[in-house]
Each structure stands twice: as structure tokens, then as C-alpha cells.
Amino acid sequence: MSTADAEYNAFGPWVDAVRTLDEVPRLFRDFGCDPTSERLVLKVPRNIPRRDADPTMDLYDHLIIAGDVDLTVLSRTGSEYAGSTLPYDAVVAIEDSVDLTDGRLRVHSRDGSVLQIGYNGSSREVVSGFVDLLRDMSLGSAVTVGSPEAATLAASMLTFPVGPAVDRRPNAVLNSAAFRATDADLMADWTNLRDREPELHLYAAHPRQRVRVDGGFLAGVLNLLRPTVLHGAIVCGTDAEVQILSRRDWFGLADRSELSSSRLIVFLARLDSVTVHRHPRYAEASVVTVRSGAASLDVIVPSDSEAERVLLVVAPHPGTSVVD
């Protein structure tokens, strides 16, 4: 059987592990990746139905290579490919989200660049395993962005107690009728994550809640005709990271069920600042911005909430948590 036929016969919507040279998609073979010498290699298929594929096509969009010191992503560009390499110690944050079959993985670098990979949501479990590996490699690498003391700094960033008592209040939120009514799937995400990472502590949680557009009469009409909610979220972490489980979009319509799921991981020792300001459009919402070098990420939470407080106190240096 030819290489093209073998690749076509194995083609489907799934993200697969690559364990041998024969399993490397032919488009990427001249890169010289040896899967046996890497920690993990994944191949991500094109987003096309199998009925539209044929053996003459390059059927994979990405080859993800997790090595010992860096992450390399090869991406198809027509009949060729381009490569990006990111050292683990430059990773600032990882986002993984799924909305039905639409999966998106984004890896943020301190230089402001973002590695973005689309995948079929049926492979969420495989991608979650890769995210866990990328997290471990990033935390295990030298977390010394600004100074040799950065690793020690990470252990002292959280100015509130870390331990079982921290989990008690947000656990009450998770067990509330309001949270279970709209965000039971987020609770399941948290349970699965905690089972994989028992060292995580639960810092804050809030259910979805109505928010109003600021303004006069027209804003009032809009609030009536298109009631908007800020989606629920769960904030958890360790002394080296904060993780946020929520939805792909922070806001949604009140009369629609939400099926998306998102996981954001931020590495504390690499942060330069954390700031918060009121959302420019919606009352009752705040925008928390975390920055590291040229990288910047916004997290939207209820104003004056426990989630806002938790995210503010992870700022790595005195004076860098700012409320506008």
C-alpha cells in the first residue's frame, strides 16, 4: 500500500498520536521529526468531510511536536508548510475551548505571538492530554522571566490562604441550584480536572448572571429585547498558576443554552501586571487584564466578585494590581 493510500485510509476527524516515522503525514516528513525521540507528537486533520477527501490530497493541517525544551507546530500552507517553535519558558498562557465540534487551541507567548490550532471537538480528550503535558513542561521549565527569584516569587504570590478552607465558599456556589441549573457541565469539567490534578484548589465560582447595557432609553430597549448574561466560571489554581473554566465567549443571550467549554491556564511567575476596569458596555461586569511582556489577555468577571479579587492578587509585584 502506498503512503498516500495509507494516509487516506486512516483519515478521519480525530487528532491522533504519531508514534512512528510511517505515521508522520507525508507533507511534514522532510522536517525530520522522529516521534520516538519526542515527548509527544500529534497530527491534526483538515476540517473536511471524508467524502471530500482523496489520496492525492495533503490531509493534515498541523503536526504538533512536544520536545524536551520547546514546542514546534508545523502548519499546512497550500502544498507547503510553515513552522513555529516556542520554548516552554516563554509560554504565558494556554487556552483550549470547544463549541460542539469546533475546537480551538491557543498558546500565548511572552513576545505577543499566539500559536493557534483548530481541531474537531470530538478529540477534546486527546487535546486536553496535550494541554496537561504542555502545562507540566511549562511549569517545569525555568520560570525566570525577570529575575532568578521568579520561581520563589510564584510561591508567595497568592496573598490569601491556600488550603481546604479556600475551597469551602466556592464549593457552596457550585452546589447551588442557580449554578446547577445552567452550568452543570462546568461543574463536570471541574470534577474531571480535579481528578487529574488533585493539587488544584478552588478559589472562586459564579453562575451566569444578567448584565445590562449602560445607557439611556435605547439601552433599556436593548436590555428588554435582547437580555444578555455573563456566563458562569470557575477559578482554581496552585501557587504557580491560575486556571479558569468557563465558556468560549464571556457573554451570551439569556434565552439560549450554552454548550461551549473553555479552559484558560495562566502561569503566575511570568506575569508583569494585572489590572481591572469596568466593562465599557455592560454594567455589573469587570475586565481583568493580565500582561506578560507583549502578551495581554482579558478575563471578564462580575464586578466586585470573588473571582475579580482572586485574579487581582496574583499580580507578581507590589503596585501592579490596578483598579481603574
Image: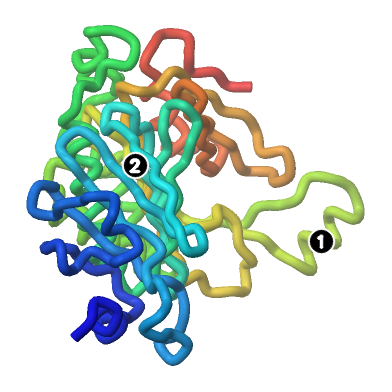
Q: In the current view of this chain or complex, which residue is farthest to the left?
A: 36
Q: Residue at x 55, y 56 (%)?
A: 249
Q: Which residue is mark 1?
A: 222
Q: Nearer the viewer, residue 149 or 156?
A: 149
Left or right, 262 with reference to 72 = right
Q: Secondary structure at mark 1?
A: helix
Q: Nearer the viewer, residue 143 or 2?
A: 2
Q: Is residue 55 above or below residue 189?
A: below
Figure quadrant of residue 15: bottom left
As shown in the figure, which amino acid type bears the numbered disc 2?
Ile
Q: Is residue 52 above or below residue 44?
A: below
Disc tally is 2
Q: Residue at x 16, y 68 (%)?
A: 22
Q: Which residue is mark 2?
A: 265
Label 1: few (<14), some (14–19) or many (≥20) C-alpha neighbours in 10 Å: some
Left or right, 222 with reference to 123 = right
Q: Residue at x 30, y 74 (%)?
A: 14
What colour scheme governs how the chains and residues are painted in the rendered image of this protein? Answer: rainbow
- State the image coordinates of residue 43 (x, y, percent, origin top left): 28, 63
Left or right, 115 with reference to 302 = left
As shown in the figure, which amino acid type bears the numbered disc 1?
Leu
Which one is earlier in the sequence, the residue at label 1 or at label 2?
A: 1
- State the image coordinates of residue 70 (x, y, percent, origin top left): 25, 36
